[in-house]
Amino acid sequence: MYNPERSDKLIKILKKLFKKDKNRYEVTLNKIEEVINSEDPNHYKNLSHDMKQFKRVHIDSHFVLTFKVDKNNKLIRFEDLQHHDVIYRKKK
């Protein structure tokens, strides 16, 4: 099992979600738990281009949670949660 770590940016996003959209907040926390408890978090798909060090998992159908896996330290760092269009625009 990997230890989770959340970026300051993600913490801020989650606080906003808690106030505005509790359902998506709960879904996001469940997805984070799923990734943490995964046998092999490397099976999640990598982003490409300049964001290739990040992996991604979809939340609902329009949002993407990005994270990095550090196998040596058994750490998963959750970085960002944004709309699909925003995340994929970053890589260009």
Image (cartoon, grey):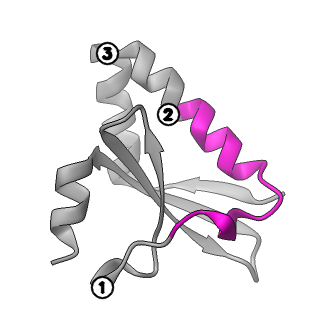
Estimate how packed mark 2 is, as few (under 14), some (14 to 19) or many (20 or more) residues with alpha carbons within 10 Å: many
Prevailing SS of the magenta stretch: helix
Tell me the quadrant of the picture where the C terminus can be found: bottom left
| Closer to viewer: mark 2 or mark 1 | 1
What span is colored magenta in the figure? 29-45
In the picture of the structure, the residue carrying the numbered disc 2 is 28
Query: Could you tell which of marks 3 and 2 lies nearer the N-terminus?
Result: 3
| Closer to viewer: mark 3 or mark 2 | 2
Mark seen at residue 49: 1
| Spatial separation of the CA atoms under disc 3 and disc 2 | 14 Å
Estimate how packed mark 1 is, as few (under 14), some (14 to 19) or many (20 or more) residues with alpha carbons within 10 Å: few
Along the viewing direction, whichever of 58 and 77 lies nearer the viewer: 58
Residue 2 appears left or right of 78:
right
| Spatial separation of the CA atoms under disc 2 and disc 1 | 25 Å
Q: Residue at x 84, y 57 (%)?
A: 1
In the picture of the structure, the residue carrying the numbered disc 3 is 19
Q: Residue at x 31, y 38 (%)?
A: 13
Query: Could you tell which of marks 2 and 1 lies nearer the N-terminus?
Result: 2
Residue 53 place in picture, x, y as percent: 46, 80
Along the viewing direction, whichever of 7 and 25 lies nearer the viewer: 25
| Closer to viewer: mark 3 or mark 1 | 1
Q: Amino acid at mark 1?
A: His
Q: Amino acid at mark 3?
A: Lys
